[in-house]
Image (spheres, rainbow, N blue to C red):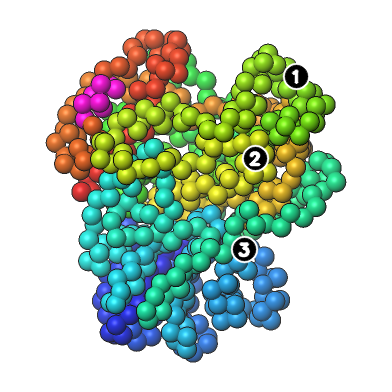
């Protein structure tokens, strides 16, 4: 894993080595000792922090005179790029540098992988920064003409060094809660984030943003002639997506939730590593045993994977007690916990202590390679493909033990309505936001709420959702505290571009959604996992834990309302009312609560981290 930072003094002042070092040090958590390389070219200075435990040094100065480069990247298909550039032995940094020399601001579209980089070209007098198509690697910046442009993987390198003041952006924080994301916006005023699939170019008098990739512009090549061929090709692409993310020689970890996505990634990684005599360390989020309640979690599905693959090391991860979680510490840059007992921190700490630099995750599959065909039945109805439509409505009804009308109501009608209402949870969350801030939010931008009767368009809309970059950046922020890079094979560009042009009827067949992916995983996933049609929430005991500590939660909110920042974002009286409307612990433990009764509990689970972020950092 790497982090990068740097500054271009637009007014031509020489860069201070002390400032660059201060920026780099601001991103290092105590206990980590990354390899640091700093380079200068007059009024430009870069730093690269390499946390790889087997790092042998990081090049930031290109062989070509007059250029500097800072990269946080993992490139796919380097051999093809080397052949195109006629650089047979080039390192990844040199490939990026040569690509920029040859194609300029258009170079990022030629790069496949996960990356964030900055490149200074003295001859052109321009600085180019770019970020991968889904924003897996983070990059923030401050533009203060005519003085300077500064960038960093983590915003703290910008505001802790005094380059910009850390000021509360209340509407940005509220937007995180209610899914009103704005690509390019950070949680602090004056600090921007480079949007996913974008490059920027800074000259002496201007900054320009360029979108270099758009899933809607992926060439609509002829899909495979049948679903079987599509599944075979998908299987081959996924295997390569996993293989290229496995570091040579060093340990690697992976999420293992028990669902289709993470199980497929873990199994494929385990099989590749087994050929090399290596193991894969996996992590599952499961419930904590309770005296009066029995929670259904993913344990049986996780166990089926563990029994099938012999080289999986495994650790279960439980949610910390609710009264400890209420008072958790939160990162300065993102609304993520820094409390050691928080689940992802437990995973990263364990992986790091076992020598891993990379954690594989199946997250992103819903939007990427394991799309479930949303809108495919409505599309078939409108187009008059009656045989397919009726066959699948009845097949889904049989598979789910529903009536055909229930399938029609749940899987067809919602995609025929031109304006879908926001889910009750989002409406309830918005009601807790202070009116002046709520007015700044505008419309919710989660594209999943506005899908229509066209499966391919729906898939592309989901792929364009800011949610992907938001979640990826959360994981990058967590991983940075442990020297861990998260990677998401199901968001591999080659894989996504292939799946995004498949016909809608490939995804819902025989009463099963995600059918093309299920077919691709035939013989790979245990049948218990491959054929399952539902997914359980992680930590199903969490709502009960919150309700059982209701009085502690009231004390927390009483203290939180003393914070001016909290009052600027939330309506404290309505937060208290939400807690007062909790169902009883006994009713919840017996599983008798409906969705409306659970709504205030889930609401508080989503709001509490943001409250802690506001009161701790502003």
**337 or 139: nearer the viewer:** 139
- Element type at mark 2: loop
Q: Which residue is mark 1?
A: 394
Q: CA distance from mark 2 to mark 1?
A: 21 Å
Whether the magenta-drawn stretch holds residue 159 is answered as no
State yes or no: discs 2 and 3 in contact (Cβ < 8 Å).
no
Could one spot residue 302 in this view of the protein? no
Q: CA distance from mark 2 to mark 3?
A: 21 Å
Residue name at image x 64 percent, y 40 percent: 371
**319 or 274: nearer the viewer:** 319
**Relative to 88, is 609 above or below?**
above
Ranked by sequence position, the earlier of labels 3 and 1 is 3
State yes or no: discs 2 and 1 in contact (Cβ < 8 Å).
no
Residue 228, percent from left and from top: 83, 41
Q: In terms of secondary structure, what is the magenta stretch mainly?
A: helix
- Element type at mark 3: loop
Nearer mark to the viewer, of 3 and 1: 1
Ranked by sequence position, the earlier of labels 2 and 3 is 3
Residue name at image x 44 percent, y 77 percent: 127
- Element type at mark 1: helix
Query: Which stretch appears magenta?
Result: 572-579
Whether the magenta-drawn stretch holds residue 577 is answered as yes
Q: Which residue is mark 2?
A: 371
**Relative to 115, is 613 above or below?**
above
Could one spot residue 296 in this view of the protein? yes
Q: Which residue is mark 3?
A: 112
Residue name at image x 27 percent, y 74 percent: 19
Ranked by sequence position, the earlier of labels 2 and 1 is 2
Q: Residue furthest right?
A: 225
Callout 2: 10 Å neighbours few (<14), some, many (20+)?
many
Nearer mark to the viewer, of 2 and 3: 2
Q: Residue furthest left?
A: 562
């Amino acid at each position: 894993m790497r982090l990068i930072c740097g500054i271009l003094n637009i007014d031509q002042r020489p860069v201070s080595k002390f400032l660059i070092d201060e920026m780099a040090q601001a991103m290092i958590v105590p206990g980590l000792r990354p390899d640091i390389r700093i380079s200068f070219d007059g009024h430009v200075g870069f730093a690269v922090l390499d946390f790889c435990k087997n790092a042998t040094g990081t090049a930031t100065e290109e062989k070509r005179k007059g250029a500097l480069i800072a990269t946080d990247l993992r490139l796919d298909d380097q051999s093809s790029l080397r052949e195109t550039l006629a650089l047979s032995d080039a390192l990844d940094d040199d490939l990026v540098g040569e690509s920029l020399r040859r194609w300029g601001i258009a170079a990022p579209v030629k790069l496949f992988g996960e990356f964030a980089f900055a490149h200074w070209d003295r001859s052109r007098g321009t600085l180019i920064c770019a970020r991968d198509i889904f924003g897996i690697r983070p990059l923030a910046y401050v533009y203060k003409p005519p003085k300077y442009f500064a960038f960093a993987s983590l915003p703290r390198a910008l505001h802790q060094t005094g380059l910009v003041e850390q000021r509360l952006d209340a509407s940005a924080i509220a937007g995180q809660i209610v899914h009103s994301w704005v690509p390019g916006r950070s949680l602090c005023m004056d600090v921007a984030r480079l949007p996913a699939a974008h490059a920027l170019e800074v000259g002496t008098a201007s900054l320009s943003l360029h979108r270099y990739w758009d899933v809607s512009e992926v060439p609509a090549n002829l899909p495979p002639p049948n679903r079987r061929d599509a599944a075979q090709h998908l299987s081959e692409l996924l295997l390569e997506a996993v293989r290229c993310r496995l570091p040579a020689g060093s340990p690697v970890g992976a999420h293992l939730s028990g669902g289709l996505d993470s199980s497929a990634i873990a199994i494929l990684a385990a099989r590749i590593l087994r050929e090399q005599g290596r193991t894969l360390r996996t992590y599952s989020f499961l419930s904590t045993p309770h005296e009066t309640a029995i929670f259904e979690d993913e344990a049986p599905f996780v166990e089926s994977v563990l029994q099938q693959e012999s080289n999986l090391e495994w650790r279960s991860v439980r949610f910390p007690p609710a009264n400890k979680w209420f008072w958790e510490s939160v990162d300065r840059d993102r609304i993520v916990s820094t409390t050691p007992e928080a689940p992802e921190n437990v995973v990263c700490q364990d992986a790091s202590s076992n020598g891993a630099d990379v954690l594989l995750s199946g997250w992103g599959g819903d939007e990427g390679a394991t799309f479930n065909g949303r809108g495919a039945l409505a599309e078939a109805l409108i187009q008059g493909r009656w045989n397919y439509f009726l066959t699948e409505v009845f097949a889904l009804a049989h598979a789910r033990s529903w009536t055909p009308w229930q399938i029609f109501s749940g899987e067809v009608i919602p995609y025929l309505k031109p304006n879908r209402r926001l889910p009750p949870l989002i409406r309830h969350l918005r009601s807790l936001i202070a009116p002046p801030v709520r007015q700044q939010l505008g419309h919710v931008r989660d594209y999943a709420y506005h899908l229509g009767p066209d499966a391919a368009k729906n898939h592309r809309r989901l792929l364009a959702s800011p949610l992907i970059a938001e979640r990826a950046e959360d994981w990058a922020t967590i991983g940075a505290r442990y020297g861990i890079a998260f990677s998401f094979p199901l968001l591999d560009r080659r894989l996504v571009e292939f799946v995004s042009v498949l016909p809608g009827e490939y995804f819902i067949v025989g009463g099963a959604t995600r059918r093309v992916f299920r077919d691709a995983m035939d013989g790979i996933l245990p049948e218990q996992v491959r054929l399952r049609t539902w997914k359980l929430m992680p930590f199903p005991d969490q709502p009960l834990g919150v309700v059982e500590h209701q009085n502690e939660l009231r004390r927390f909110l009483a203290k939180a309302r003393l914070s001016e920042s909290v009052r600027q974002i939330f309506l404290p009286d309505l937060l208290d009312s939400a807690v007062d409307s909790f169902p009883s612990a006994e009713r919840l433990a017996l599983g008798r609560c409906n969705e409306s009764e659970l709504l205030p509990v889930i609401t508080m689970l989503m709001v509490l981290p943001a409250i802690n972020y506001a009161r701790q950092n502003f």
